């Protein structure tokens, strides 16, 4: 008999989060800040950690979290609530990265730890709002807010930041970061179908190597690069298995939980993350065998695409799953996009490895920053078919023009398939939650109605035929 998991929460997780918040209050009373700047910093820390703890609690309380999710929740707690650095050996350097075009393999190959620094913090956004133009996207504002407050070890301890020059916001952010921390602006092709652009990207990756070697004091070798490609390959393999489980009807895991584990990928050494995903895959295999599901047969299957969804800004996936949908597909850049395609090595020389990485990090990438992005439409259609998606939520962060540009084409294409799509614009704050809830709830009701009409019409046809 199938079983729906309605477990309300994980008491031990809430206990951990509760302790964290209480300990923070104790610390605050024991060591009250003295100067105005310290008081402002303390207020920032209190607010940022509280918001993160709240969203972590909502994640943990969303019914049906597999036990193997605990380490992924823990890493989000370490980084966002406890404000710890990433777990790493003492002499390992941290290299900050942004977007999905920086090959982690190059960073691992010089013995360093990559940490993806794109941010979803509402509190840091509020600070960054005063530092960058009003119409810049909130992701950039949050990054600059953390930089200004100097409270997050993952930002403050970076030996180097590598910023791919994708959209205008990232370009200007690279310029601002450069004034504060060592920053490498990585030029990425605007037209990946052009050999000339691709060749330029290969040379960019070659130029990144001495920068990484200089800050880590280690040299890259054929062996170290090949090993890091293998390590990332194992992560991609586990990701592909996980993706198969996500296709199951009824669902074996909530999409918001899947998004949390993808966010955790930004802060964990790749071997550790892959091992934890391996354990989660084993648990999902048991769930499948035991018919232990987290959705009902007729629950609307939703996919999210558009601007990045970065912890703690997970209000939209939570709203989808709290208002009756099940999130089965995630086409955002914090989702499977960063791990979907494996590195295919054809030429076994060092140059061959470099060219394979250049291909892997651009050609299959569906970011809207490329001139021609018809590939993204194809990918979304493929995901709709694979995951039996019934409706698409198109997320646009305020100021993220590149995604907004692509909306109309996608709506037209999905219209031809009869797949409803809703565009939801949002910012890094909680003021729009109720309005978003109403719109998302109505969208899910519409899909239920559409599904009912389809089933009635099929029934009528079979009665007539019979
Ligand atoms: S969607 Fe935008 S923010 Fe995300 S990886 Fe692509 S260019 Fe970067
Ligand atoms: S692609 Fe959009 S969300 Fe990403 S940095 Fe650019 S404007 Fe911001």
Image (tube, grey):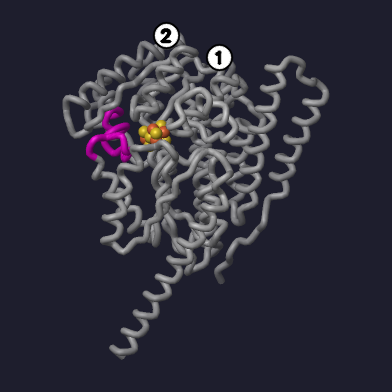
The residue positioned farthest toward the front in the image shown: 134
> Hey, which residue is sitting farthest left in the picture?
195
Q: Name the residue under label 2.
A: 214
Ligand 1 quarter of the rendering: top left
User: Residue shown at 60%/21% (left/top)?
Assistant: 149
Give the image location of residue 177, x and y in percent: 46, 17
Give the residue drawn at x 41%, y 41%: 307
The answer to whether marks 1 and 2 mark residues whose Cβ atoms lie closer than 8 Å is no
Q: Does the magenta stretch include residue 42?
A: no
Is 390 positioned to the left or the right of 309 in the image? left
Image coordinates of residue 64 in percent, x first then y, are 59, 56
Q: Which of 78 and 183 is in front in this view?
A: 183
Circle 2: is it few (<14), some (14-19), or many (20+) Cα within 10 Å? few
Q: Is 48 situated above or below 413?
A: above
Judged left or right of residue 458, residue 58 is: right
Query: Tag on residue 47?
Result: none
Q: Position of residue 79 (x, y in %)?
A: 60, 30
Q: Work out whether residue 267 or residue 369 is closer to the camera in this orientation and state it.
A: 369
The residue beneath circle 1 is 91
Q: Position of residue 331 (x, y in %)?
A: 39, 46
Quadrant showing the N terminus: bottom right
Instruction: From the viewer's side, name the closer residue of 444 and 114.
Output: 444
Few, some or many C-alpha atoms within 10 Å of disc 1 (few <14, some 14-19, many ≥20)?
few
Quadrant (top left, top right, bottom left, bottom right) of the C terminus: bottom left
Is residue 263 toward the left or the right of residue 166 in the image? right
Q: What element carries label 2?
A: helix
Left or right of 360? Residue 258 is: right
Q: Which region shows up in magenta?
A: 356-372
């Amino acid at each position: 008999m199938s079983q729906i998991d309605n477990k309300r929460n994980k008491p031990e997780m809430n206990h951990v989060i509760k302790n964290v918040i209480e300990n923070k209050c104790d610390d605050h009373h024991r060591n009250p800040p003295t100067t105005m700047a310290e008081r402002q910093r303390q207020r920032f820390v209190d607010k940022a950690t509280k918001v993160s703890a709240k969203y972590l609690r909502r994640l943990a309380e969303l019914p049906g979290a597999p036990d193997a999710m605990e380490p992924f929740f823990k890493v989000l707690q370490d980084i966002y609530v406890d404000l710890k650095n990433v777990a790493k050996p003492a002499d390992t350097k941290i290299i900050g990265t942004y977007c999905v075009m920086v090959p982690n393999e190059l960073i691992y190959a010089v013995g360093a730890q990559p940490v993806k620094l794109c941010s979803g913090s509402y509190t840091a956004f509020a600070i960054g709002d005063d530092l960058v133009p009003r119409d810049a996207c909130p992701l950039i504002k949050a990054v600059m807010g953390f930089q200004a407050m100097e409270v997050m070890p993952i930002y403050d301890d970076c030996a180097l930041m590598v910023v791919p020059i994708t959209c205008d916001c990232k370009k200007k952010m690279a310029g601002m970061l450069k004034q504060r921390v060592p920053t490498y602006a990585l030029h990425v092709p605007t037209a990946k179908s052009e050999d000339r652009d691709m060749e330029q990207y290969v040379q960019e990756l070659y130029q990144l190597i001495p920068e990484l070697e200089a800050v880590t004091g280690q040299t890259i070798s054929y062996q170290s690069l090949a090993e890091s490609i293998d390590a990332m390959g194992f992560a991609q393999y586990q990701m592909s298995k996980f993706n198969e489980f996500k296709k199951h009807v009824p669902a074996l895991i909530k999409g918001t939980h899947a998004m949390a584990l993808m966010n955790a990928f930004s802060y964990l050494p790749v071997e550790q993350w892959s091992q934890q995903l391996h354990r989660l895959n084993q648990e999902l295999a048991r769930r499948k065998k035991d018919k232990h599901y987290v959705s009902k047969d007729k629950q609307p299957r939703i996919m999210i695409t558009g601007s990045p969804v970065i912890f703690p800004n997970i209000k939209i996936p939570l709203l989808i799953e709290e208002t009756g949908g099940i999130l089965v597909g995630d086409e955002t850049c914090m989702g499977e996009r960063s791990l979907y395609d494996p590195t295919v090595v054809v030429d076994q020389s060092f140059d061959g490895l470099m060219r394979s990485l250049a291909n892997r990090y651009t050609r299959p990438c569906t970011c809207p920053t490329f001139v021609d992005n018809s590939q993204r439409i194809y990918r979304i259609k493929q995901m709709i078919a694979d995951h039996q998606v019934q409706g698409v939520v198109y997320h646009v962060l305020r100021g993220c023009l590149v995604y907004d540009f692509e909306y109309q084409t996608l709506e037209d294409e999905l219209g031809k398939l009869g797949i409803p799509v809703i565009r939801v614009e949002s910012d890094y704050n909680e003021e729009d939650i109720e309005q978003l809830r109403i719109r998302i709830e109505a969208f899910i009701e519409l899909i239920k109605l559409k599904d009912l009409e389809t089933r009635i019409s099929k029934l009528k046809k079979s009665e007539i035929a019979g």
